[in-house]
Amino acid sequence: TNASGSWSNGKYFLQTADIDLAAVSSWTPIGSSSNTFQGYYDGGGHDIQNLNITGANPYVGLFGRVTDVTIVNLRIQGDSLSGQSYVGGAIGAVEGNNSLIQNVQTNIAVYGSGTRIGGVVGNFSGGQIINCGSKGNVYGTSVSVGGSIGFLTEGKIQNIFSKGLISTSNSTQGSIGGIIGRIENADTISLINGYSIGSVTADGNSANVGVGGIIGRIESGGVSTFIQHVFSAAALSEN
């Protein structure tokens, strides 16, 4: 799927049944650092089961790197996935200004050794995330770790949740949040209707780490940042 530059541009993919990936020891993400996915994927309300990814590569998730996509109606379940930076339970990195991620839920442990690690999306830089959430645990050893979104620079986020345990270690300038790890250099952000009910923990060199039940840190806030009807019951701790 990642062999040619524009293979997915404008293509429509419909999933018509649950897909079990138990026979795949380590899934190769759809869309890579050099070959982004640009299509429309409709999961049809079905599951991706037994997703597993090992290694320390960037752009890790069911989808690795995507641009101006629509990905909807999908549930992702599995044991664990691991990578370096841009690691998400569903998508490693969403780029462009016109993406729609809607009705996507994950239940998988996410591990990242670099930056931008999230339960649903590692990095989100434009478009909309609607009716999405993560039930799995998220663990990072660097910066920008979020229960649902690791790093956010632009977009509308509506009806989002995180239910897992979120933790980071050995980070001296990091940020960890129950829903979003870090917002930076944003022009327009809206976060409406969301909750986090897991725990949020920063271990190790945590003196300068931003820790929040909703958002870990906001840097260089933009023209408009609007947050409404969002709550956290997450236990916060720094060790």
Image: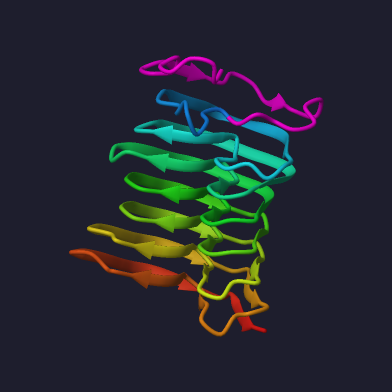
**x, y (%) of residue 130?**
40, 47
> How would you classify the magenta stretch by its main secondary structure?
loop
Q: Residue at x 51, y 28 (%)?
A: 31
Q: Residue at x 64, y 21 (%)?
A: 17
Q: Quadrant of the N terminus?
A: top right
Query: How many marks overall?
Result: 0
Q: From this view, report whether residue 27 is shown above or below residue 160.
A: above
Q: Quadrant of the C terminus?
A: bottom right
Q: From this view, report whether residue 191 is shown above or below residue 30.
A: below
Residues drawn in magenta: 1-29
Q: Quadrant of residue 168?
A: bottom right
**x, y (%) of residue 25?**
80, 31
Q: Is residue 110 magenta?
A: no
**x, y (%) of residue 132?**
49, 48
Q: From this view, report whether residue 44 is shown above or below residue 127.
A: above
Residue 129 in the figure: left or right of residue 45: left
